[in-house]
Image (cartoon, grey):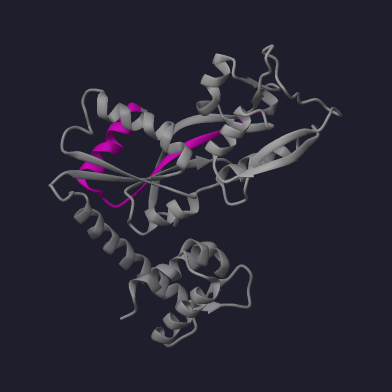
Amino acid sequence: MADLKLFEDLIALAQTGSFVRAAELRHVTHPAFGRRIRALEAWAGAPLVERERAPVRLTAQGEALLKTATQVVERVGLVRSRIRSSGPAGESVVRIATGRSLARTLVADWIARLRLRSPKVLGEGTQVEISTGRMQDMTQQLELGRADLLCGYEHPALSVDLTPGRYRYMTLGTDRLVPVCQVDSRGRPRHALAEGGTPVPLITYVGGLSMARIVGDRLDTFPYALTPFIRCDSLDAAHGLVQKGLGVGWLPWSMVGGDCRRGALAVLGGRAEEVSFEVRLYRPRARLSDLAEAVWDATQRGQ
């Protein structure tokens, strides 16, 4: 019998269409991932991948095995989820995968409502496990049954890549990225967005971050002289650098609204410079633990 991780490797390869991206998702080197796929092919006794194509595609035998592998991983994940839905002392546990900044903003507010408002869904004897990281990694957590719910961004330039037909979602909230900068001692913005004006230092995001794709989709359309200065791997880092006066950054209003109301940061431009996006909550169509189902149902009613 093939190791379960080899089935998970095949699923990752089918999702990404790339050995390099799949290896990143599985947290192994490219050569090691290739060896694992070859080991699965040796076990199956047939080629599973059309390597000469880009993006990579599975052969007919690979597609047949993928269907079974997906079912096996899903069922094992479901059993694991049910086992883990009770903590060591009998507590009920709901597992949420999300991004680092979402965890401390919208997700934190959402959990607080479930904990504090009546009727309490997250009462005594319940626990919440939050995993944070890159959205492609968090998506994999949901696909492999290591999370009950996934909270992530949705925008035309960025979509959560889940196996079609196996998941459903609801919109948890909406937000917008706004260009902000520090204000000077007289309360005026340190920088300005002006066509043909002085180049403005830009604080932006590394390529693997969701926000890099959302912001990058719009930056090319702006007529302003923006000079990339610092690339960050988190919204929190970008927020801190903007607060220090090091440049202009497009940040979620949910994160910087308080700073702007206090007069510490200033919003530049108008609605045309803003980028709207959704925050969605995803779940498997298969039944979850009682607590996870209660969290989903209460959230849906609240919407």
- In the image, the segment drawn in magenta is 274-302
Q: Residue at x 56, y 47 (%)?
A: 209
Residue 214 sits in which quadrant?
top right
Q: How far across and down, in percent of the image, does residue 158 sit?
A: 57, 46
Residue 279 within the segment the image draws in magenta: yes
Residue 102 sits in which quadrant?
top left
Q: Residue furthest right?
A: 196
Q: Classify 83 as above or below 126.
A: below
Task: Tell me if 86 is positioned left or right of 31 in this view.
Answer: left
Q: Residue at x 76, y 23 (%)?
A: 192
Task: Tell me if 130 is positioned left or right of 34 in this view.
Answer: left
Q: How far across and down, in percent of the image, does residue 227 sit?
A: 77, 39
- Quadrant occupied by the C terminus: top left
Q: How far across and down, in percent of the image, does residue 42 sit?
A: 43, 86
Q: Residue at x 40, y 75 (%)?
A: 65
Does residue 82 appear in this view? Answer: yes
Q: Residue at x 57, y 40 (%)?
A: 155
- Quadrant occupied by the N terminus: bottom left
> Which is more toward the observer, 74 or 101?
101
Task: Tell me if 222 is positioned left or right of 139 in this view.
Answer: right
Q: Classify 113 as above or below 49.
A: above
